[in-house]
Image: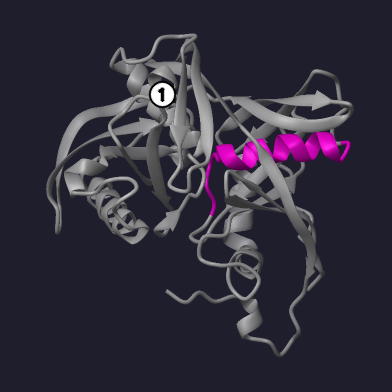
Amino acid sequence: MDTLEVVDMHTGGEPVRIVLSGYPALPKGTILEKRAHVRDRLDHLRRILMFEPRGHYDMYGALLVEPDLPGADIAVLFMHNEGYSTMCGHAVIALGRYAVDHGLVTPVEPLTTVNIECPCGMVVAEVEVTDGRAGAVSFESVPSFLFAADRTVDVPGFGEIRFDVSYGGAFYALADAGQFGLAFGRSPARAFVDAAAALTEAVRQSVPLSHPDSPDLAFLYGSILTDGGDGAGGVATRNVCVFADAQVDRSPTGSGVTARLAAMHARGRVAPGETRLFESIVGSRFTGAVLRTALAGDRAAIIARVSGRSHYSGKASFSVEPDDELGRGFLVV
């Protein structure tokens, strides 16, 4: 196995392990075809990078690949403890800064545009640049929409729960945490994880999903439990996103903020041009705004703008000795 070279960053506390080298060349094709190839042929490398002893249950990764869409500066596949997601806002924020800092785009002050091809489509990031140094990053979402509103489902152990399903580059179930007897700042993180994971499983069984662009996008990525607020007036609304195999996002979740904005806009709770404030379970914050309305197929949709900051935490070279079975990746759960 070739050495795997990575740079580690975090956005709002959520890790982003950017894979620079060590993967074999991928066949040409669309980003979804590349995603399928990596999933079906190279998943052992995800396990090495994401799992122990080099990673942990909540590690997150981004693999840079050859762009396919015209105008893309970089292309990326996202990975986590379960597999490969279609969109990741916190990773886009990190990649925007990384692209400027490492010369993948030509820096332009005060804003540098980075076109990032994701499995869900092209995501346009804008990076604040001062004296050649990248700072805060904003991105424009793909068309995002409320898929199902005010549904109810019986969640084992919790009873009947009211929820929405909304798309922000990935599909999420959205629900008020109070329905589970949970309160931010008082209830332990484990309780949020158990509740959100139970909701995800119940919604997966009860709500068939579809997406106008590709059936590969039509899966429920996770659940977001909120405090019921809307982030208006400078008062942050808190949420926690539990995705993949009960993985907890430490950031406010970029695609989740987008999904929440889509649901709020569909209900008339946020208008184009209004900025809202979102806070994660660890206290980090993103701002989000509805830029304009759009269409996703024949569905009414929005284009959202989400902003945050990312920081570097290190870099590493990883390898596996031939006789090291544990070194191929494991999780203690």
Toward the viewer: 274 or 186?
186
Magenta residue check for 97: yes
Asked whether residue 65 appears in the rendered view, the answer is yes
Magenta residue span? 84-103
Determine which quarter of the picture holds residue 327: bottom right
Q: Find residue 304 and report its horizontal and vertical position in percent.
A: 51, 21
x and y percentages locating residue 127 in the rendered image:
73, 27
Q: Is residue 67 visible?
A: no
Q: Secondary structure at mark 1?
A: helix
* Nearer to me, 265 or 75: 265
Q: Of residues 319 and 134, which is closer to you in this image?
A: 134
Q: Main secondary structure of the magenta part?
A: helix
Q: Quadrant of residue 25?
A: bottom right
Q: Is residue 154 left or right of residue 100?
A: left
Q: Nearer the viewer, residue 134 or 90?
A: 134
Task: Please give the residue where the numbered disc 1 appears in the rendered image.
Answer: 261
Q: In what quadrant of the picture does the N terminus appear?
A: bottom right
Give neighbour class at mark 1: few <14, some 14-19, many 20+ (Cα, 10 Å).
many
Give the residue at x 34% y 56%: 193
- In this rendering, is residue 82 above or below 302? below
The three-letter amino acid code for the residue at tag 1 is Leu
Q: Is residue 61 magenta?
A: no
- What residue lies at 33% left-to-right and 58% top-to-bottom? 188
Residue 33 x/y as whole percent: 61, 45
